Every structure is written in structure tokens, then in C-alpha cells.
Image: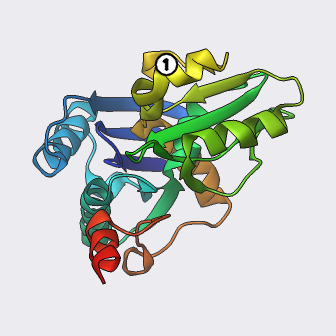
């Protein structure tokens, strides 16, 4: 099974190709460049280097959210355009799952946090049980202190490892609480993790036709929230 994955859900952008349980290649950039300018050239170059064509892919996978509203729309458009062109289904992979999956086989809780500004984060709490990643909470959009409270409540004496771009934004508060943090190369959304999870999701029947795919938003776009506050 060949899967081409796209991630533009945050500040970084990446593309990757996985064949069954093997990562064939990944391009990753985290320089705050415009995703609409970088993602398709990265994708084209990766396939060129791997000597593959889009039609050799069995699925197109994409980080489906939550995340940057603009970034998610760019990723969705790229995935849908490619999937329509080659008549393949899309495998949506929740962004928070992607971040948690980076911290493989952690002995404690894994808590991804994506910065949503004003000390708000997108998050969920995970643990590995019998070698499998299990999500212990709903996907959350909440105040950082509330995420701390939820994680503490579920820890039962286990370590708590934070990952995601929220670690960079709120690292001081995390360290003060005595929590662990993932190293930089594990703290960003990666298309390689999107693709690897997509293999499992595809086998489980979670692929959808491109016309049925839409990004997953936990909360409304900022412009809509501001408008509603004025009404």
C-alpha cells in the first residue's frame, strides 16, 4: 500500500510517502513560509526523487485538524485536488493523533498541545496500552490550566509528556509544573506520522471519497468569533 501524506495544519509543512510499514521519504520545512507556495513544489519534488507518480498512490492522507484554519484549508485543497485527479480516496488523520504518535511507546501520558493563542490550546490526552496508542479524552479546545488539570487527574502517578508547538509557546509554565517535554524533532506535526497512521486507518475502513472530506475544526474561525462578539 502506497500512501502520500500532506500536513499543513500548523506552522510547519511536510509531505511524505509510506509503503506499507516503510517510510520511503519525507520533506519537512518549519520556516513560517506560506504553505500555499511550498506544499505542491515539495510534493512534486518528493515524488520525483522517489521516482514515483501520483497514480501509483493507493490513498492520499492529510492531517485533518484541528489546527490553523488557513493551513487546514490549504492541505484539504491539495489533498482533494490530487485525490480527484487520480481517482483515489482520502484518509483523514486527526492532527492531535499525529502529534501523540510521534512520542512512540511512552511509559506515561502523552499530551499534545497546539497553540490556539491567548493561552488556549488544542489538545487531548493519550496513553500507550499493550503497545497501542489510546486516546483517553475527547479532542479539546481549552485553557492551558484546564489541560494541566485533566492530565493530572488521569496520570495516576505516571509521567506526563507534553509535545506540539504549544510546548514552545508555553514551555515555562510546563516546566514549572514538573512535566516532561518531547525533543524538538518530535514536537511538530509530521507527514511521516500522518502517512503511518493512515495505513492503519485505511485498513480500518476510514478512507473517504474526496467530495466527502472536510477539515475538522474544534472551534469557529477567529473572524467568525469576532463577528459574533460584536452582535
User: In front: 90, or 220?
Assistant: 220
User: In front: 211, or 99?
Assistant: 99
Residue 188 in view of the camera: no
State left or right for residue 25 relative to residue 20.
left
Residue annotated with mark 1: 172
State left or right for residue 120 relative to residue 144.
left
Task: Residue at 49% x, 18% y: name it.
Answer: 172
Q: Position of residue 16 (x, y in %)?
A: 36, 38
Q: Position of residue 122 (x, y in %)?
A: 51, 49
State left or right for residue 207 relative to residue 14.
right
Q: Position of residue 121 (x, y in %)?
A: 49, 46
Q: Looking at this view, name the residue that lies furthest to the bottom.
A: 231
Quadrant into which the C terminus falls: bottom left
Q: Please say if 157 is above or below 63.
A: above
State left or right for residue 121 relative to residue 88.
right
Residue 222 in view of the camera: yes
User: In front: 120, or 124?
Assistant: 120
Q: Residues within 10 Å of mark 1 (few under 14, many from 20)?
A: few
Q: Secondary structure at mark 1?
A: helix
User: In front: 193, or 103?
Assistant: 103
Task: Residue at 38% x, 54% y: name it.
Answer: 57
Task: Residue at 20% x, 46% y: name it.
Answer: 39
Q: Quadrant of residue 158?
A: top right
Amino acid at each position: 500500500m502506497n500512501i502520500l501524506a500532506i500536513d499543513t495544519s500548523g506552522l510547519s509543512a511536510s509531505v511524505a510517502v509510506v509503503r506499507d510499514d516503510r517510510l520511503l521519504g519525507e520533506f519537512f520545512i518549519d520556516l513560517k513560509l506560506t504553505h500555499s507556495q511550498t506544499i505542491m513544489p515539495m510534493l512534486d519534488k518528493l515524488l520525483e526523487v522517489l521516482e514515483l507518480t501520483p497514480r501509483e498512490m493507493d490513498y492520499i492522507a492529510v492531517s485533518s485538524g484541528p489546527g490553523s484554519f488557513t493551513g487546514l484549508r490549504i492541505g484539504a485543497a491539495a489533498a482533494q485536488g490530487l485525490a480527484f485527479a487520480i481517482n483515489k480516496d482520502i484518509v483523514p488523520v486527526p492532527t492531535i493523533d499525529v502529534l501523540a504518535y510521534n512520542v512512540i511507546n511512552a511509559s506515561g501520558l502523552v499530551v499534545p498541545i497546539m497553540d490556539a493563542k491567548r493561552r488556549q490550546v488544542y489538545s487531548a490526552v493519550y496513553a500507550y496500552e499493550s503497545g497501542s496508542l489510546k486516546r483517553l479524552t475527547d479532542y479539546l479546545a481549552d485553557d492551558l490550566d484546564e489541560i494541566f488539570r485533566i492530565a493530572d487527574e488521569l496520570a495516576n502517578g505516571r509521567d506526563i509528556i507534553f509535545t506540539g508547538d504549544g510546548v514552545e509557546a508555553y514551555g515555562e509554565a510546563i516546566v514549572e509544573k514538573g512535566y516532561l517535554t518531547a525533543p524538538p524533532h518530535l514536537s511538530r506535526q509530521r507527514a511521516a506520522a500522518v502517512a503511518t497512521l493512515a495505513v492503519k486507518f485505511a485498513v480500518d475502513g476510514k478512507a473517504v471519497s474526496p467530495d466527502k472530506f472536510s477539515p475538522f475544526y474544534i472551534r469557529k474561525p477567529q473572524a467568525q468569533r469576532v463577528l459574533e462578539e460584536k452582535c
